[in-house]
Structure formats: structure tokens, C-alpha cells
Amino acid sequence: MTGFSVFTIGVIYVFSQVYNNPIILYVGATIVAMQSFISYWYSDKIVLSISGAMPIEANDNQDLYRLVENLCITAGLPIPKIYIIDDLAPNAFATGRDPKHAAIAVTSGLLQRLNRSELEGVVAHELSHIGNRDILLSTIVVILVGFISLISDLFLRMSLFGGRSRDDENKSGGFLMLIYFAVMILSPVVGMLIHMTISRKREYLADASGALLTRYPEGLASALEKISEFPLSMTKASKATAHLYIASPFKGKDAAGFVAGLFMTHPPIEERVQILRGMDVK
């Protein structure tokens, strides 16, 4: 996370040098700090609101609440707030800044289509995200990637519409201009690649941790197969929150190939299932 913040500020530094205006660096660094602060304290509320998740109490769904409670006792974690998303597509995610301020959201379709062992596998996966502190990391990365894309787009528009004077162009020099345009074009791509790489690695870890928690990898493997086989996309999912879900909430939009694989928010389901079924948890 420190490296990501340094990279973001480095992008802003290049822009400030090209425009010969240190105020750009000061303002940009301040915004990065504010974005990190907001995402740390309010990320869970923002994500849950965007997803249309509704909170439930123990009396609203006793089976789900007891399942989460039992797994939390096994994992040594506080019981997170539980939310349900009214959506036919089976899926789930976890969010929050730490185990004491965490939440798990599952769709109504997940509750309808999975048996108990499969649902237990999914919940264990999400609790592993909480225990591994993935929930905070994933949300802050989203904020920073979005900010990099925003400032790159802003300076691109300024360049196209005469945001720089000839004096500035002469002072910056040809080599610095080359760096400027390279950073402006490539920084959102690099930021997105970092984002996707972090997301995929944490999914593998949560799969393994969840399987060890339940001592039954087949439950999660079977659940992932059912989730991937459902033909419809989630109605309230967005690109900004897609990586938080246990599986991609979008159907029929994943292209094949090495380059396309770099931008996938999740590892291939087939590969995850194969790894889970090859685990020995005895």
C-alpha cells in the first residue's frame, strides 16, 4: 500500500514538473491522503450502499446467522454484520476496515441455490478475507486506482485543449514531455494491473484459508461451480466493486488470452476448483 501511494504521488510529481507548478504536487498529495482516510473509515458503508445490501439480525435468518457465528468461533473472529442483497445471481463479498468493523453480504440467489456445506464454504472464504485483512486493502486500492485514472484523464484533457503555454513547453524539454505523455497514458493501466494482481492473489489465499477453516474444500469448490454456471449477471454490480465478490458478478464478458487474463478481477474458476480439490486438509 505504501508503494502504491508512492507510485500515485510520483505520477502527480511528473505532472507538476511538466507544468512547472509545485502546487499540483501539494494538492495531489493532499487528495491522496484524504482518499486513503475516507476509504479507511467509510469504505464498508460506501460499498454496501452501492451494492444495495440490506442488514439482517439473528431473527431475520437464523440459519445464516448461526452458520456465520459458528465459523467465527472456529476462526477466532468477531461476528461481522450480515447483509443480504436481493439478487437472483449467487454471489457474496466481505468489506470493512478490520475484523471488529467488518461485514459480509450474500445474495438471495446464493441462499436459494447452495446447500449448507456449499454456503459454509462461501462464508468461510469471506471470513478468511476478513481475517487476512484483504477487505481494507482491496477497497483502498480501488480508491487509488480511480484517482490515478482521474488525474491522468484531467491532464490529458488539459494537454488537448491548450492547458500548457509555450513557455512551459520550452522549459519542460522534449525528454520530460516524453515521460509526461508516457506516464499520462500508462499510469491508469499500471494502476489497474496492480489492482487486479492484488485481487487475484488474495482470492487464492482466501480459498485456501476458507478450506482449512471448514476442513471440507469440496464445499467451496462445488459452490464456485454453481456460482459460475449461473447465466445472469448481478443487477447492481459495478466495475468498481466487482473484485470484492467471491466470483465475477458479470457473465459472458470475460475474454480469453494472456493479455485479457491480466485484467481479470478473479482467477479462473476452473483453476480455483482444481486447487481446492487437490488440497489435503486431514
Image (cartoon, rainbow, N blue to C red):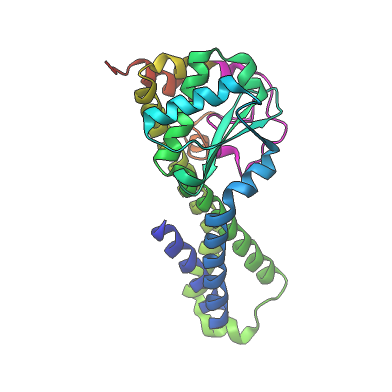
Dominant secondary structure (helix, strand or loop) of the stretch shown in magenta? loop
Q: Is residue 247 magenta?
A: yes
- Nearest the viewer among 186 and 114 is 114
| Image coordinates for residue 246, horizontal then vertical, percent | 52, 30
For the magenta stretch, what is the residue range? 226-255
Q: Residue 252, can we see it?
A: no
| Image coordinates for residue 217, horizontal then vertical, percent | 39, 18
| Image coordinates for residue 46, horizontal then vertical, percent | 64, 49
281 relative to 105 in the view: left or right: left
- Nearest the viewer among 156 and 127 is 127
User: In the picture, residue 84 is in which quadrant?
Assistant: top right
How many circles with numbers are drawn on the protein?
0
What residue appears at the point 50 percent right and 22 percent down from the top-left corner?
67
Q: Is residue 66 above or below residue 126?
A: above
Q: Quadrant of the N terminus?
A: bottom left
What residue appears at the point 45 percent right and 62 percent down from the top-left corner?
5
